[in-house]
Image (cartoon, helix red, strand yellow):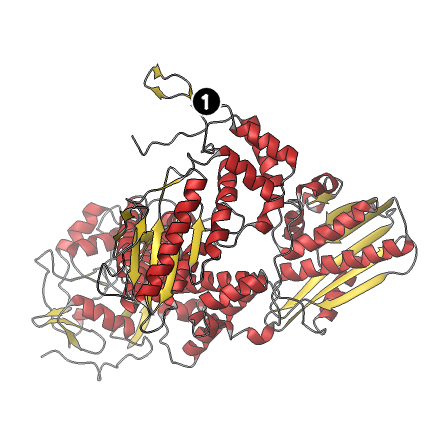
Amino acid sequence: MASFRPVTLTSTLCKLMERIVARRVRDCIEDKLQPQQAGFRPARSTLDTLMQVTSAVRRRRDGEKTAAVFIDYARAFDSVDHNCIVKALMSFGVEEHLVAWIADFLQGRTAQVRVNNTLSEDISLTCGVPQGSVLGPLLFIVTVDSLSKRLNCIPGLQHGFFADDLTIVCTSADLSAIQQTIQQGLDCITRWSEEHYMEVSAEKTEYTLFGARETNLLSLKVGETVLKEVRTPKLLGLTMQPHKGLSKHVQGVKAAADARLLQLRAVASPEWGPDREKLRAFYLALVQAKVCYGIASWWFDTSLSDRERLEKVQAQAAHIVAGIPKAANRNDALCEARLKPINEVAHRRALEYYLRLKAKGAVHAKIAESIFPPEHPIHVRLAKVKHLYSTIDGTGKQHDATVLQLARRVHFNTTTPGGLKADAPEKDKKMHTMRRVVRFREFDYQVWTDGSVVLDVSSGAGALVYPKEGRREKVVLGAGSLACSYRAECVAMEAGLKRLVDVIELNQTHRTRVVAFTDSLSLLMALSTGPAVVEDAILRRIWDLILRLVRLRVSVNFQFVFSHCGVPRNEAADKAAEQGNAKPQMYPAWVTDIVTGVERQVRNEMYLSFEEGRMQRTHRSVLLDHVRPAPKHTKLDRPGESLLAQFRTGTSKHFGWLHRVLTRKTDRLECRWCRAKDIGGNAVEGHTLAESAVDSANAPDFGIATRQSDPIICPLCNMVCARRQAGVVHLVKIHGLKRECALAMTKKARRAALTYKNGYTCHVCGDAFERRGLLVEHMAQHPPVVVPTVEERPKRH
């Protein structure tokens, strides 16, 4: 009963009012909150706290030890004093009418408890923030911010906050210094809690000394209670260890992932179930989200064996999603399922986190360098594109709620001209686009923008400003060597609106009508969300320009037009964008573009390794050159997708290389899929049996297969099946026979010369193996183009 928490179920109207108030409060306090608090803040998550703590543990030198205390508050949200909340809001400078509204919202609340049909009496709630409300978490982090300020004043003490989860950390080679610093922090927390009528649960508060093999080296107290030491503490879902490695955490993650993979197998099969993309979404949400939680903070501290355990989980999921056998190559399976190795996911998320910290300013850049020292693996990858950009585009300042009224005056038309689709004829596109353009011929200004990109080389942005009367204005600039097409379109729009603002302010024209044309529908969709929602810095800058125009009493319209369909002004903007490729590429780089550029360089190096022969090519890489399948093939069902994936990966569910057959007459490998006959399944009679490989005069005849486990030769296409049941499945699936007919044929099928007394042998090179698994691995590595002739082929004695 002590763990039960009351949840406030307020009305929809109340939640709407809370959101309005919360937005205005957040506009006032967000920049003033301490950076150690990561809970309930935009663009922050548990990863921030995990990074702060794990980096402090990781950075200790030889001989140093790190102590971490994990503070647990008893009923934190239910015990916050209302007067303390009001004082905290006033200290942040929140407007008085908002503080008064919040005080009235908190005070005078009552609650009732219903058990079955029995309803308790009203209970007055004199403290705490309503759990389940919109304002509750925000008011709590405002209150505990003063505790962060006090802890920052203690030398040598670091801390991380996520809502009410507080962790304090100290690193030193002197245990007495650690004891003194940590105890000073605990005393500070105790005093602050008493002042704010909150209670630290000493029984649940624990500490760990990292880097020490002995236990009980510290004596820490909360009040009069001595804290207990734990060897494997759990922080926000991450199980930590006092020494190097995170095997306990990996073990727990793998166990949870295996249990969820069973659920994935229960709803999927190569013959039935959802299509590949639905299974992929199911896996990403149910399994990979569990495996990769906070992975940027712990992946690089794990051992190679622990990493391989999680890579196997990803590989198993890829085989299930793609519907291919377990014998398929791991990389091929990941390509078919459109998944990445866990190592690539970890590197991408760590690199994104590092770059986003660098983009927030000098203070956060210093934190980024402490979390990711120069020897960190992400710097090796980042060095591949370091020469392609000079600076990182910042986050920009978020617009407050006061601009919402002005934003309503801007119109965005995100429909296509004439309702046409992208694959419509060029003639129709031009006709409907020109009809849309003609409607705005009486506007005072027209802005046409376009972008041009040459990957990893250069990009250009072009903008043309056409006044109703007078000379046009042209802007051409480089958008950066790493910019994508969307980024180049954004740069072009920013440049065009900036030139338009200068022209209108210079001419001092009022009551002006302006229309901006662009062929980037994604840009218009992003801008149409509003200035208070956009998070990208360049979108915020574009909205700054739009709001400047609105304040000048300018009517602003944005229209989408088709590109490359012969519209004169769009073609002119496209030529201007191409000219921008020759301009200096000094525009600040976007974080997403940098990460994508790094991944592109890694893929290029992998392709080069295959081309130079340093990495062995698989059957799929020979066929498709590592190209991933399309997200969705609308004409294929689940069995069709699985069969196509099996063909591309070159494996069978029952025996190795399904598509590869070695014929003795031609001494070469032939594609079984092309040789398979289309045979009906009505009866066995009338089928002309193919000449078996063992019918050769030089090959011995092993007679009829009498055991279920004997390998057999398919009577129709000479395929060697591992056992009789595999032959039945082969005849049903490949040749279309009914099961009764297939069973009758396999009972008279001849035994294959696959196994010897000493195990298994390769029918290409003659090497013998003790287990079938070793033979499968050998065949997977056997070069398909190197096939021995009849004279060179080993003879059985």
> Which residue is denoted by mark 1 in the rendering?
110
Residue at (13, 56) in percent of width and height: 748
Considering only vertical position in the picture, is 561 above or below 777?
A: above
Residue at the spot 51% in from the left edge and 75% down from the top edge: 383
Q: To which quarter of the image does residue 297 belong?
A: bottom left
Residue 689: give x, y in percent of width and height: 22, 60
Which residue ends up furthest to the bottom in the rendered image? 791
- State the image quarter where residue 615 is shown: bottom left
State which quarter of the image contains the N terminus.
top left
Q: Nearer the viewer, residue 32 or 193?
A: 193
Identify the secondary structure beneath mark 1: strand
Q: Nearer the viewer, residue 557 or 442?
A: 557
Q: Residue at x 39, y 55 (%)?
A: 184
Q: Is residue 621 left or right of residue 365?
A: left
Residue 428 locus on image (x, y percent): 72, 50
**Residue 61 percent across, percent down from the top left:** 36, 72
Left or right of 164? Residue 249 is left
**Where is residue 662, by image quadrant?**
bottom left
> Relative to residue 210, is residue 576 drawn left or right?
right
Quarter occupied by the C terminus: bottom left
For the residue marked with disc 1, what is the amino acid? Thr
